[in-house]
């Protein structure tokens, strides 16, 4: 009996640690209100709009960047491609200068042939981590940025970790690279 109680206590303690690691929903800040692009800046005339409660990207080139600058954070978003051979991306700690994309930005790729890869401007620093998703299928990424480290997760699994970020702070951005996309459930949790 004593062994069973000890085992039960250990299991309960482990469950509490797992639950404590996951941020509460109330701790997150939505980056998209579902109605308009308040809190975002359109760079280089990319064609972003709000349609049916999602951010819709028409085929164009440029960036939609948060007006706020972030240092350490967890960023989550869902996206889906609306056409084949798709290409887009999430910028992290990016500046606002550059045409059509921020110069020297860090990007998590949303390109069919390199889904989940980490790029430094045009150079791949971490190869793609997952196979292409079918057109029209929503998928979710969680990107954690702390100090010089970035990690990327999907479906509860860490896909990669990179330890050499050189931008201390910047905007979060959505990349328009000639293909139609949609984005929803964008949120951020600022961390220390």
Image: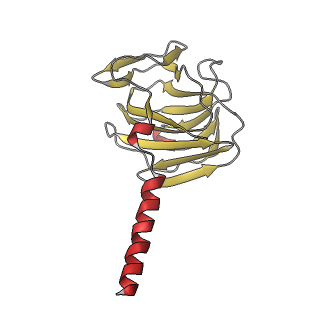
Q: Which quadrant is the N terminus positioned in?
A: bottom left
Q: Is residue 69 visible?
A: yes
- Give the residue drawn at x 47%, y 32%: 87
Give the image location of residue 96, x and y in percent.
62, 19
- Give the residue drawn at x 47%, y 50%: 130
User: With respect to residue 146, does 167 lie above or below?
Assistant: above
Q: Which quadrant is the C terminus positioned in?
A: top right
Asked whether, in this view, residue 168 is left or right of residue 175, the answer is right
Q: How many numbered markers are drawn?
A: 0
Along the line of sight, the residue nearer the viewer: 127 or 154: 154
User: With respect to residue 84, does 56 lie above or below?
Assistant: above
Along the line of sight, the residue nearer the viewer: 34 or 139: 34
Q: Quick one: which residue is furthest to the left in this view?
A: 52
Q: Is residue 115 visible?
A: no
- Give the residue drawn at x 43%, y 35%: 85
Along the line of sight, the residue nearer the viewer: 124 or 31: 31
Give the image location of residue 148, x and y in percent.
69, 43
């Amino acid at each position: 009996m004593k062994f069973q109680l000890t085992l039960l206590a250990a299991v309960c303690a482990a469950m509490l640690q797992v639950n404590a690691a996951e941020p509460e929903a109330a701790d997150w800040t939505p980056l998209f209100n579902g109605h308009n692009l308040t809190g975002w800046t359109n760079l280089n005339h990319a064609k972003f709009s709000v349609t049916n409660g999602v951010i819709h990207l028409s085929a164009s080139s440029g960036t939609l960047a948060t007006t706020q600058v972030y240092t350490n954070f967890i960023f989550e978003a869902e996206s889906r491609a609306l056409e084949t051979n798709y290409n887009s991306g999430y910028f992290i700690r990016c500046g606002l200068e550059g045409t059509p994309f921020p110069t020297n930005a860090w990007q998590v790729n949303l390109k069919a042939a390199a889904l989940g890869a980490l790029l430094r401007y045009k150079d791949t620093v971490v190869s793609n981590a997952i196979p292409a998703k079918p057109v029209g299928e929503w998928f979710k990424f969680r990107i954690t940025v702390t100090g010089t480290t970035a990690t990327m997760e999907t479906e509860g699994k860490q896909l990669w970790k990179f330890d050499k970020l050189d931008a201390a702070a910047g905007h979060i951005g959505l990349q328009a690279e000639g293909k139609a996309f949609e984005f929803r459930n964008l949120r951020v949790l600022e961390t220390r």
